[in-house]
Amino acid sequence: MAKTRVQYVCSNCGRISVHNLGRCPKCEQYNTMQEQVINPEPSVSSKHVNRGLSIQSKPVKLQEIEGGLDERIPLSISEFARVLGGGIVPGSIVLVGGDPGIGKSTLLLQMTMEMADQDESSPVLYVSGEESEKQIKMRAMRLLNQPGTSQQPMPDDLYLVTETNLNTILEHVQTVKPEILIIDSIQTVYIPEINSSAGSVTQVRECSSRLRELAKSMGVAVFVIGHVTKEGAIAGPRVLEHIVDTVLYLEGDRYQAFRLLRSVKNRFGPTSEVGVFEMRGNGMIEVPNPSEAFLAERMVNAPGSSVVVTMEGTRPLLVELQGLTSPTQFGNARRTPNGVDFNRLLLVVAVLTRRLGIRLAEQDVFVNVIGGLKINEPAADLAIAAAIASSMKDVPVRADAVLLGEIGLSGELRWVGQLEARLKEAAKLGFRTAIVPRRVRGGEPWPKGIEVIEARSLHEALKKALKEA
């Protein structure tokens, strides 16, 4: 009998070691090495004969391949369709991640119920490894039958099953032959032939590979729900994100109503696209005009408030930025951002202190993005600086103005991309003024309906933005 061997695999990056290390030498993360028993028998990969996408394959000319951009499964949830690039691509595999309780299962169940309720639609199979069929039925009844509304029947072509054995799941797929397959979640699915627990690096990698082969060979659209770590990344090896075609993150504060479905990888559409939803009792309700929703509770002419137009994929969003300065009660002043990058906040504060002479060394600085949105692009630098300066001077920013511009270390304003689309969105929502960086060379005329004020430096922009000017 062959001797059983043991190896250790990093759950973060997949590095393999023969020693149990406290720190992974590749990703330098602590306590990520997991024990894995190496079976001397032939591995599951070698036991299966048909490991390719099909039994027989041959090269085909590109012009002879049928299909195109129009071959997508339409979605009635337009925000979901926007993030996917226009609809569901048959044979694709989509990974959906997010914090616990953020609404991943609710959104996918709502999507599958609407897909199964469409006329002449193929069956939809929902596989859950965390809930029973009765629990899913209770959630489906809550989504369909709200108090005060007419009772709606359950869809006929939606099948539910509670199963974690991938071999059994594949048998159910062969029986039902669904058009869409939901796996909730990938960390609960396992292959019996592999000697490791569900959720381990080997199990997640092998199960994802099997599901990818299923999607490509049968043309089934597979949606996989994945857990996230404390840092907010998809749990398991990074190879999981390379296997799938699309990676979506459902973001938002659990104590706020808005949810943002963000695309960080998409082989069939634009990346960084965002869909906005509102969590209600009857499920995830799409927000057709997110800019108006983010600015609904804005206090006009309040010091420390400014508006920026940020680009989320191809969509411009108007967001309120709030800044607050307060004399510090401790030795070191605090810098507390919520929704903006910490390093960008430090840069803006340093430029305000050094180039404009605003004394922030003894002030606690707080910056908040309303609505739970996270802004990473430097185009929000000017709005952040205006909110901080407005709070420090106790002077409001012009209520009808949006501010756009990246701040350099010398205090200059630098150009931002897609400025025309941003200005058109601001004019559509009633803003009459935009303060932007000065153009180095001439270009197309500014959009109509909004007055564009160009500024060369941060000092010049703040003089035009604050009402005391």
Image: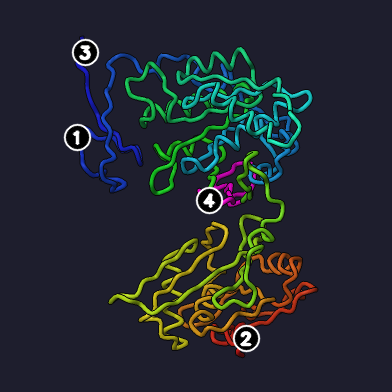
Is the residue under label 2 in contact with that under label 1 (CB below 8 Å)?
no
Q: Position of residue 145 (x, y in %)?
A: 69, 31
Q: Which stretch appears magenta? A: 252-273
Is the residue under label 1 in contact with that under label 4 (CB below 8 Å)?
no
Q: Which residue is mark 2?
A: 467
Q: Position of residue 312 (x, y in %)?
A: 61, 57
Closest to the observer, 442 or 425: 425
Relative to 401, does residue 238 appear above or below in the rendering?
A: above
Distance of mark 3 from mark 2, alpha carbons?
81 Å
Residue 192 figure quarter: top left
Q: Which residue is mark 1?
A: 19
Is the residue under label 1 in contact with that under label 3 (CB below 8 Å)?
no
Q: Position of residue 467 (x, y in %)?
A: 62, 86
Tell me which label, 3 or 4, sits earlier in the chain. Answer: 3
Q: Amino acid at mark 1?
A: His
Tell me which label, 3 or 2, sits earlier in the chain. Answer: 3
Looking at the image, which residue is at 69% across and 76% down?
Answer: 400
Q: Amino acid at mark 3?
A: Ala
Looking at the image, which residue is at 53% across and 70% down?
Answer: 322
Residue at the farthest bottom position = 469
Q: For the residues carrying marks 3 and 2, which lies nearer the camera in this image?
A: 2
Q: Which residue is mark 3?
A: 2
For label 1, the SS is loop
Distance of mark 4 from mark 1, alpha carbons?
40 Å
Q: Which residue is mark 4?
A: 252
Q: How many marks overall?
A: 4
Distance of mark 4 from mark 2, alpha carbons?
33 Å
Q: Quadrant of the C terminus?
A: bottom right
